[in-house]
Amino acid sequence: MKLMKPLIVFVCCIALSPASLWAQTERARAFVGAQIIPISGAPIQDGVLIVSGGKITAIGSRSSVNVPAGAEVIDVKGRVIMPGLVDTHSHVGGGSGADGSGPIQPETRILDSINVRDNSIMRARAGGITTVNVMPGSGHLSSGQTLYLKLRSGKIVDDLLIKDAQGNIAGGLKMANGTNSIRSGSTGPFPGTRAKSASLVREQFVKAQEYRNKITRAKGDATKLPARDLALEILVEAMDGKRMVHFHTHRHDDILTALRLSKEFGFRIVLQHVSEGWKVADEIAAAKAPASIIVIDAPGGKLETVDLLADNGALLERAGALVGFHTDDYITDSRWFLRSAGLAVRAGMTRDKALYGMTMAGARMLDLQDRVGTLERGKDADFIILSGDPLSVQSKVLETWVEGMKVFDRNRPEDRLYAVGGYGAGRDESFDFSCFDLGRDN
């Protein structure tokens, strides 16, 4: 037995090595017979989706697509395939950003506090989410840098990172206004009013402008360069359009303040939440500012969201704004993300724009539209297999695939636990008997 143990370990290592796992994606897979909703065009009946090497290599009807010889053929007749969902604002991974030392901390990276082994990541996969913008909180005017992740299987955060063509880690900058970042009666570094909030932000961006000007004037002369400032560097990246600003804002006046700051300092903006977006929908559309909305179907929350309407998305759509969705998980559970689109359609949003909002609109908000958001040849093989129509309350996410690898399968008991379990199923170090109620399919 002592001789056999090393052999067993050796064989297991071979079976689970990264090279062998990647080799699995090299063999083409053909998903045949499903209704395919590519988002980029009309639904395809009796469709064929072929993936290989982590990419989509062909898509179309059975009569128009030839399945390559040697491909693994997967019968998905009666199912629906659509792109993986893009969540533009989430807190999965248990990370946190800025602390109480100051109201503006753009140098803080959520990257340094995300636990990709946290159960919430699996819960997001169970909801069909394949790409996510992980945010620090909104209790600061800027609580730090966000992180765009692919929800691949991985043991460390590096396994889930998205990088741009230059090899830079993809992410944005979190900013906020409204009541979250206000400390009432504050005499310290935090603002006590909305006006002071805006003035503190302006002050920091002016410093960033001066910092950028000094670097420009130095012309590469190290003796003339200013001392490196990590916070100002990030604000310069935002002003230069290299980093999207994700701006938490609810009230209509706060929304206009965010747009005003964006125009004044030239940073690109995604408006997050916009509870009163419907009140200034024309202004949002005129500014060409994307609006990522949250759909809440139960009362409660903060006073500044009291005028949130169910038809917020519909009214923004009619005004011509780009509308996406987010969970703000745990505000809404990642497992039920598709309900956001269903509820938005129920309130008047068009079906096509609601499904676009779950996928391609989010991709555009994260500058990832060339890789994800639609099912097209050459794009990443990120897709979900559903039991039925994506807007039906009866439909379930059966499988989630990221770059041609299955990361969730409802038929696997250990995966199904995350899909149907109670609160404890998605909370590390939490024991909840509702997690073990596997007899119910809810």
Image (cartoon, rainbow, N blue to C red):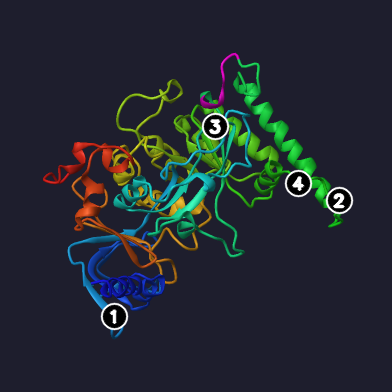
Where residue 361 appears, as percent x and y from the top left, is 45, 51
Of mark 1 and mark 4, the one earlier in the sequence is 1
Say if the magenta span includes residue 184.
yes
Can you identify the residue that label 4 sits on?
228
Cα gap from disc 1 to disc 2, whole angstroms: 58 Å
Amino acid type, mark 1: Ala
Q: Which numbered dot is residue 217?
A: 2
Cα gap from disc 4 to disc 2, whole angstroms: 15 Å
Cα gap from disc 3 to disc 2, whole angstroms: 35 Å
Cα gap from disc 1 to disc 4, whole angstroms: 53 Å
Say if the magenta span includes residue 163.
no
Q: Label 3: state its secondary structure.
A: helix
Q: What predominant SS class does the magenta segment belong to?
A: loop
Question: Which of 44 and 293 lies nearest the eye of the viewer?
Answer: 293
Of mark 4 and mark 2, the one earlier in the sequence is 2
Can you identify the residue that label 1 sits on?
71
The quadrant of the image that shows the N terminus is bottom left
Of mark 3 and mark 1, the one earlier in the sequence is 1
Cα gap from disc 4 to disc 3, whole angstroms: 32 Å
Please tell me how crowded label 4 is: few (under 14), some (14-19), or many (20+) other residues with Cα within 10 Å. Answer: few
The quadrant of the image that shows the C terminus is top left
Give the side of residue 226 with respect to residue 332, left or right.
Answer: right
Depth-wise, is mark 3 or mark 2 nearer the camera? 2
Question: Which of 258 and 398 lies nearest the eye of the viewer?
Answer: 398
Can you identify the residue that label 3 sits on?
255
Amino acid type, mark 3: Ile
Give the quadrant of residue 297: top left
Of mark 4 and mark 3, the one earlier in the sequence is 4
Q: Label 1: state its secondary structure.
A: loop
Tell me, yes or no, whether the two marked residues, 1 and 4, touch with CB atoms within 8 Å: no
Tell me the magenta residue range: 180-185
